[in-house]
């Protein structure tokens, strides 16, 4: 499906810094606190089988910041961290890998 540049401009992606990370017991989920520069967000991510919480602390990630919040297993998720590798890719043996900036950019920097 193709989208227009106007559609793409509606998507707000920013650099975030993981400042807290913990596994939600009994799930494949991690509860992350991410500093976006001007605010901190809680994001629930299904990457616990690929990343340990301590691997993510102080890691810069790309966040989809204007995704409508939703409750996952009783926890509000206020965005999404982006990764390469989706469910179809996992079936071929490709594990998800978090997208990170190639260089030192401050939290809150917009992806464009």
Image (cartoon, rainbow, N blue to C red):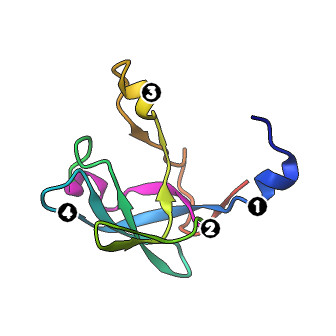
**Residue 75 shown left or right of residue 108 in the figure:** left
- Viewer-side residue, 22 vs 92: 92
Q: How crowded is mark 1: few (under 14 residues within 10 Å), some or many (20 or more)?
A: few
Question: Residue placed at 27% from the left, 59% from the top?
Answer: 30
Instruction: Give how far apart the Cα atoms at labels 2 and 4 are.
Output: 24 Å
Q: Residue at x 86, y 54 (%)?
A: 6
Q: Tell me the crowding category of disc 3: few under 14, some 14 to 19, or many 20 or more residues within 10 angstroms, Cα based.
A: few
Q: Residue furthest bottom?
A: 38
Helix, strand or loop at label 2? It is loop
Residue 62 belongs to the span the image colors magenta: yes
Q: Residue at x 19, y 63 (%)?
A: 24
User: How much space separates mark 2 and mark 3, taking CA atoms?
Assistant: 25 Å
Give the mark toward the camera: 2 or 3: 3
Mark 2 vs 4, N-terminal side: 4
Residue drawn at x 23%, y 50% is: 28
Per the model, the C-alpha gap separating discs 1 and 4 is 31 Å
**What x and y, as percent, mark residue 5?**
86, 48
Q: In this view, does 91 lie above or below 53?
A: above
The reply to whether discs 2 and 4 touch (Cβ–Cβ < 8 Å) is no
Q: Is residue 74 placed above or below 86 in the rendered structure?
A: below
Magenta stretch holds residue 94: no
The answer to whether the residues at label 1 and label 3 have Cβ atoms under 8 Å apart is no
Task: For the residues labelled 1 and 2, say whether their Cβ atoms are less than 8 Å apart.
Answer: yes
Residue 88, numbered label: 3
Question: Is 21 left, or right, of 8 in this rendering?
Answer: left
Residue at label 4?
A: 24
Q: Residue 10 carries which label?
A: 1
Q: Looking at the rendered structure, which numbered label has been put on residue 66?
A: 2
Separation (CA) of disc 1 from disc 3: 26 Å
The x and y percentages for residue 67 are: 58, 65
């Amino acid at each position: 499906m193709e989208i227009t540049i106007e559609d793409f401009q509606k998507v707000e992606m920013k650099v975030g810094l993981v400042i807290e990370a913990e596994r939600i017991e009994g799930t494949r989920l991690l509860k992350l606190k991410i500093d976006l520069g001007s605010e901190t967000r809680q994001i629930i991510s299904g990457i616990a089988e690929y990343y340990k919480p301590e691997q993510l602390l102080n890691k810069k990630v790309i966040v989809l910041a204007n995704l409508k919040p939703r409750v996952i297993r009783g926890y509000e998720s206020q965005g999404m961290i982006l990764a390469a590798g989706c469910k179809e890719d996992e079936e071929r043996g490709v594990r998800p890998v978090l997208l990170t900036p190639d260089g030192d950019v401050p939290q809150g920097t917009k992806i464009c």
